[in-house]
Amino acid sequence: MKARYDDIDEYIADLKAEIAQNEQCANHYYNLGLALLTKRDFVAAEEAFLNAVRNSPHLAEAYVQLGGICLERGDLEGCLRYNEEAANCRAKFPVPWSNIAFVHLQRGEPDKAITALNKALKWDPKFVQAKNALATAYYMKGDFAVSEKICTELLQAEPGFAPAWNNLALARFDLGNYTGAAEAVQKAQELGFDVPQGFLEELKAHI
């Protein structure tokens, strides 16, 4: 959002005025969509992003936002479709590949997720969320050692990323390293991650 705006409604009003002057400007529609998202007005935001891609069919970021709105209402198929469209527009854009992987993980399809995540990480090797999702995908496959290795590498670079500590704890637990799992859980909790109670109880029973 532009720094000179203190009021989101004023910003939205100005964007709408600019759109009235130039209804073909995809960027104005895109910025309007982002502003409406901050107000959690998903219906109006969706309309703005759809107008953005009508005027600029290769605006990958708008497809990603449309996918996010689909996810907000539990429409995994829509989320997948829009992110695939974004990836088609810009193959080297890592975000849609990561989002595609998220849908596959939600559907219990780790192999498809791994394929998408490898593409995301090819274009952005430091994409922390994608790397953590890769650890999750290998964990889902039962490749606990690979999951542990990915988490360890990630945490060497980003020691403050709490979800990776939780993933590391899960992998270590299933590898039988209960002390290491407990250490990882403690780090995850120190960083504010809400470790599932069921896992904590299961871990406690093994120590």
Image: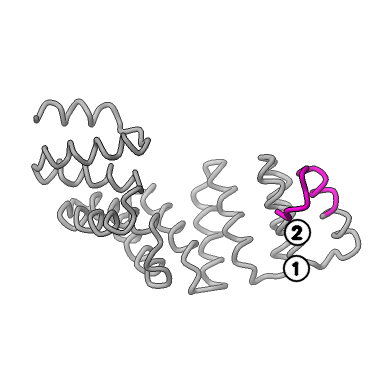
| Disc 1 from disc 2: Cα separation | 9 Å
Residue at point 15% right, 27% down?
Answer: 204
Return the mark for residue 14: none
The amino acid pointed to by label 2 is: Tyr
Residue at point 70% right, 41% down?
Answer: 41
Image coords of residue 13 (percent x, y): 85, 48
Provide the residue designation for mark 1.
55
Image coords of residue 82 (percent x, y): 56, 59
Image coords of residue 64 (percent x, y): 57, 58
Q: Nearer the viewer, residue 61 or 159?
A: 159
Q: Are marks 1 and 2 in contact (CB under 8 Å)?
A: yes
| Left-right relation of 177 to 114 | left
Local packing at callout 1 (Cα closer than 10 Å; few below 14, some 14-19, many 20+) is: some
Sequence-earlier tag: 1 or 2? 2
Q: Secondary structure at mark 2?
A: helix
- Say which of marks 1 and 2 sits in front: 2
Provide the residue designation for mark 2.
29
Whether residue 9 appears in magenta in the rendering, the answer is: yes
The outermost residue toward the front is 4
Residue at point 31% right, 59% down?
Answer: 157
| Left-right relation of 156 to 54 | left
Whether residue 167 appears in magenta in the rendering, the answer is: no
User: With respect to residue 3, does 8 lie above or below?
Assistant: above
Image coords of residue 118 (percent x, y): 34, 67
Range of residues picked out in magenta: 1-14
User: With respect to residue 94, does 101 lie above or below?
Assistant: above
